[in-house]
């Protein structure tokens, strides 16, 4: 029987183990590496030795230890298209260490690395990236990603396929800064209705966000042809021939399909990612990294402009084996090393542990990518029809703070609630107007209002699912196109949105967004590997946020200034309750205790960090003193903000020689005339945790010290809150205010105060 | 940028006003063969040979209707076609100047025969 099992209802686990068992990380599954199942991140014993053997006439005889006559369809396609036969002999002759250094070294330009990598076989590239340390992978990603400006993609979906909510959430995502929006549908036939909502909403805050609605290929292409979506990415490829053909495709059919999308001016990337082959039980004993190296080479060979990888649906499988999370990043790097757009995963929840899922995403955020997420769940998890993403709507503030903490551009920006409401309303209203104008469906005001205010679809009134389905059917049957949407927007009073939606259609004519890593910025400029190439060459080079963009990154809605704090504090002022009587003198009553308060106490600051007002705090201390039959006086100490000095000054003025020092933030101590300034009799320093009872006890104990009797024991407050994180910014502001008041009032001397109770 | 659409319309002519007047159809916002070829050249100049080739195939496919195009895709999927059917498809593609596409289909037929992916 295990030491940690329970027997007869008795828990025999060690307390320390029980504590760990309760942590969320232990809800995750972890697997022993098992190369036969493909449950190994890097370097399976079954991975082939890299090789490239060519006959005198240039015919390839062998790649990665496989002879040409045994090439499977994937090998064949890679040999024909992915690998530069001129470059290969040179690149393959280089050692893995040499290649790894070339990839990481900032002084070797990206173009040079791309040239060398064009001659690498999948097995060789897999070996090279598997020897990189995490920070080396990040260095390489910073240099090798295609587009200079990083960006981000959002999932925008909901359980009801409600097109108005899709539109409002699309507008929300664009307002937050996402430049690609990916939808899908729980009900396949709803797709065109969702695509239209997404298209309209995506253009409300700013022009240029690309949209897609992920369904099966023929439908997706049909929606693309009609201009209802502008890109596609769920065109999957796999690393073994068996899984590939089980997926009902071959490299040739996928290459043809890729060209089909381009022929209609639709941006497209392929989708792969480790773990997929393992999940299908067909990894052929190979490592995840090697199979993905094959996928990435194949994507290059097919001629796709980019790849979505980094685990994707198999991310949690990959993360369950040693080195798995590093493998996910290595996958993204391999895409970059082939010169393709990296849409860098992070789009499925890899862990129940917040610490672990942050650890999975942070490296990508710090190094930057063409798309840091291939789907940040911009809607609440329950509305994500792809399944929860690694970061979701509830994590937006966390993400914005991470961006700000590190000072990096993660593609997003803060949003103020007023603008957000306006954008959501406009998106919902414009979509309603289009649906009504085109005779697709009618939505009432109540529905629009619910959509605007909703967190997600759970906040919407119960609706008839048939309404959306019916609308979608009409769209399909009547062959509605983007031009109908534009006309409807123009005719129903949304000319500026009409113009932006038409702008997305117009952009197809030039096709500039078919190039590698293309997005539109908010002025409809194309940013791509051609127009905005990554030029990182070491410190001081490459992408740096503009001052405007940096200001967006730095400004989060929760940030507060000193002026904000003064305004907030003023709300708690109770005028007339603390009246100055004049200069304070030295008392002679042996029962007298002086409460010395800080310069801003009741002049600028009125509420302590615990949330009690300064009046409540005073009442408690006074009551405590009175319980001990002492005579309290209250004096404002004007020449210092230091709590010890305040207490000591109060003690000097006190007939008993005992003083209480009290700052406006709530820290309090008891002092005695003859003690050195930095000593004290009792101190409560963690202001946020001081309760009314504790203040009363301070009064009681000060009284007892004055009388020479035994004080009552004080319990220290405890909390596991991040006290410094919560309160220190406030403390800094409060101290600044205290300091200012001290400078202003010093000349006045200490002032006797009358407390009205 | 003064690219013209599939129908020959200039991008500047694609306006909301024109849409309201019913002057535009999908071919006016569809990418043309020559624009795709220009994009292929741009990709090749920047070193993306494979993307260039993909865009060349795409340029060829502008001549085909959606259904024809998707039927050709379907024929290339595993176990859909015999060797001869793929050869016939290649000839049809070639007859309409889709030489790169035809080459891809012929190559597929050879590999499919060796790997058992024919019907």
Image (spheres, rainbow, N blue to C red):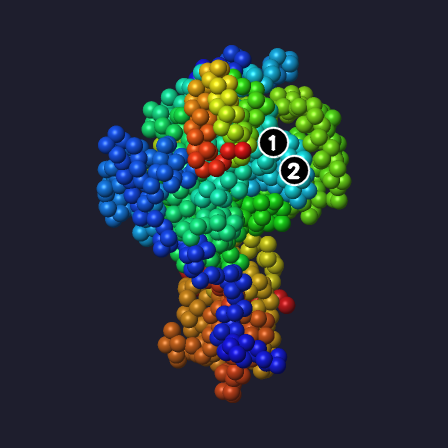
Residue designated by label 1? A219
Where in the figure is residue A332, as x and y percent of width and height?
40, 44
> Where residue A374 appears, x then y in whole percent?
49, 42
Q: Residue at x 64, y 14 (%)?
A: B22
Disc 2: CA contacts within 10 A as few (<14), some (14-19) or many (>=20): some
Query: Which residue is at the front of the view, B20 or A13?
Result: A13
Question: Which of these two is toward me, A159 or A571?
Answer: A159
Sequence-first disc among 1 and 2 = 2
Residue at the spot 48% in from the left edge and 44% down from the top edge: A242
Residue at the image position 57 percent from the left and 20 percent from the top: B65
**The quadrant where residue A421 appears:** top right
Q: Which residue is mark 2?
A: A188
Quarter of the image with the C terminus of chain B is top right
Task: Mark 1 and mark 2 in contact? Answer it, CB < 8 Å.
Answer: yes
Say left or right for B49 vs A344.
left
Q: Is residue A727 above or below residue A93?
A: below
- Residue A561 lies, with reference to residue B105, above or below; the image says below
Could you tell me which residue is drawn at 46 percent across and 26 percent down? Answer: B105
> Where is the N terminus of chain B found, in terms of image quarters?
top left
What chain does mark 1 sit on?
Answer: A
Q: Foreground residue, A468 or A114?
A: A114
Q: Where does residue B91 sit, x and y in percent of width and height?
A: 48, 19
Q: Residue furthest bottom?
A: A709
Disc 1 to disc 2, C-alpha distance: 10 Å
């Amino acid at each position: 029987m295990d030491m940690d099992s329970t027997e007869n209802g008795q828990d025999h686990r060690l307390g320390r183990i029980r504590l760990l068992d309760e942590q969320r990380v232990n809800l995750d599954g972890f697997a022993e590496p098992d190369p036969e199942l493909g449950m190994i991140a890097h370097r399976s014993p079954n991975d082939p030795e890299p090789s490239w053997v060519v006959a005198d006439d240039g015919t390839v005889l062998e790649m990665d230890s496989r002879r040409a006559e045994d090439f499977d369809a994937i090998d064949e396609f890679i040999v024909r298209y992915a690998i530069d036969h001129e470059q290969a002999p040179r690149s393959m002759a280089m050692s893995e260490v040499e290649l790894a250094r070339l990839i990481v070294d900032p002084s070797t330009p990206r173009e040079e690395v791309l040239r060398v990598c064009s001659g690498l076989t999948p097995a060789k590239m897999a070996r090279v990236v598997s020897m990189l340390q995490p920070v080396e992978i990040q260095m390489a990603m910073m240099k090798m990603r295609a587009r200079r400006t990083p960006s981000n993609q959002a999932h925008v979906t909901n359980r009801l396929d409600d097109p108005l909510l899709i539109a409002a959430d699309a507008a929300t995502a664009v307002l937050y800064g996402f430049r690609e929006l990916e939808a899908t549908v729980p009900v396949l036939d709803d797709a065109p209705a969702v695509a239209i909502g997404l298209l309209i909403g995506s253009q409300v805050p700013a022009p240029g966000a690309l949209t897609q609605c992920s369904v099966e290929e023929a439908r997706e292409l049909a929606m693309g042809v009609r201009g209802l979506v502008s890109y596609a990415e769920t065109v999957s490829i796999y690393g073994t021939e068996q899984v590939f053909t089980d997926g009902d495709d071959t490299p040739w059919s996928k290459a043809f399909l890729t060209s089909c999308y381009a022929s209609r001016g639709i941006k497209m990337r392929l989708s792969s990612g480790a773990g997929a082959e393992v999940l299908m039980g067909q990894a052929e004993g190979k490592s995840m990294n090697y199979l993905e190296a094959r996928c990435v080479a194949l994507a290059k060979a097919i001629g796709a402009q980019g790849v979505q990888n980094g685990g994707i649906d198999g991310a949690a499988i990959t993360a369950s084996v040693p080195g798995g999370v590093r493998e996910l990043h290595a996958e993204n790097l391999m895409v970059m090393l082939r010169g393709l757009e990296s849409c860098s995963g992070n789009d499925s929840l890899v862990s129940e542990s917040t610490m672990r899922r942050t650890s999975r995403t942070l490296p990508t955020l710090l190094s930057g990518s063409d798309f840091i997420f291939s789907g940040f769940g911009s809607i609440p998890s329950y509305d994500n029809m792809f399944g929860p993403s690694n970061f979701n709507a509830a994590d937006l503030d966390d993400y914005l703070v991470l961006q700000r903490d590190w000072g990096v551009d993660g593609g997003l920006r803060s949003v103020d609630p007023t603008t957000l409401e306006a954008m959501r309303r406009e998106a919902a209203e414009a979509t309603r107007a289009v649906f009504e104008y085109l005779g697709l469906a009618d939505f009432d005001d109540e529905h629009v209002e619910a959509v605007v205010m909703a967190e997600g679809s759970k906040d919407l009134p119960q609706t008839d699912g048939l309404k959306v389905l019916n609308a979608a059917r009409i769209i399909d049957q009547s062959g509605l196109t983007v031009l109908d949407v534009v006309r409807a927007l123009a005719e129903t009073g949304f000319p500026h949105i009409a113009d932006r939606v038409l702008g997305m259609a117009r952009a197809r004519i030039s096709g500039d967004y078919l190039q590698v890593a293309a997005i539109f910025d908010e002025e409809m400029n194309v940013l791509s590997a051609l127009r905005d190439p990554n030029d990182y060459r070491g410190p001081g080079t490459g992408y740096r946020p503009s001052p405007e963009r940096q200001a967006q990154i730095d400004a989060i809605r929760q940030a507060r200034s000193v002026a904000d704090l003064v305004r907030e504090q003023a709300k708690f002022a109770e005028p007339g309750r603390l009246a100055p009587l004049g200069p304070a003198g030295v008392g002679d009553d042996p029962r007298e205790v002086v409460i010395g308060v800080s310069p801003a106490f009741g002049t600028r600051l009125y509420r302590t960090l615990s949330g009690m007002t300064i009046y409540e705090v005073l009442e408690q201390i006074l009551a405590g003193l009175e319980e001990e039959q002492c005579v309290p006086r209250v004096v404002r100490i004007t020449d210092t903000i230091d709590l010890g000095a305040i207490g000591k000054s109060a003690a000097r003025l006190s007939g008993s020689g005992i003083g209480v020092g009290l700052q406006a933030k709530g820290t309090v101590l008891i002092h005695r005339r003859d003690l050195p300034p930095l000593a004290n009799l009792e101190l409560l320093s963690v202001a946020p945790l001081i309760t009314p009872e504790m203040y009363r006890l301070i009064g009681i104990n000060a009284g007892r010290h004055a009388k020479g009797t035994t004080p009552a024991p004080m319990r220290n407050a405890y909390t596991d809150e991040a006290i410094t994180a919560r309160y220190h910014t406030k403390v800094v502001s409060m101290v600044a205010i205290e300091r200012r008041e001290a400078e202003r009032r010093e000349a006045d001397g200490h002032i006797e105060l009358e407390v009205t109770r | 940028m003064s690219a013209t659409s599939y129908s020959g319309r200039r991008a500047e002519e694609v306006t909301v006003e024109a849409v309201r007047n019913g002057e535009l159809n999908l071919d006016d916002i569809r990418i043309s063969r020559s624009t795709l070829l220009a994009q292929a050249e741009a990709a090749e100049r920047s070193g993306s040979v494979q993307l260039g080739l993909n865009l060349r195939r795409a340029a060829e496919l502008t001549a085909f209707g959606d259904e024809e195009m998707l039927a050709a895709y379907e024929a290339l999927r595993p176990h859909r076609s015999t060797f001869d059917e793929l050869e016939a498809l290649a000839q049809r593609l070639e007859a309409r100047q889709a030489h790169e596409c035809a080459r891809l289909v012929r190559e597929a037929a050879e590999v499919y025969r060796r790997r058992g992916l024919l019907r």
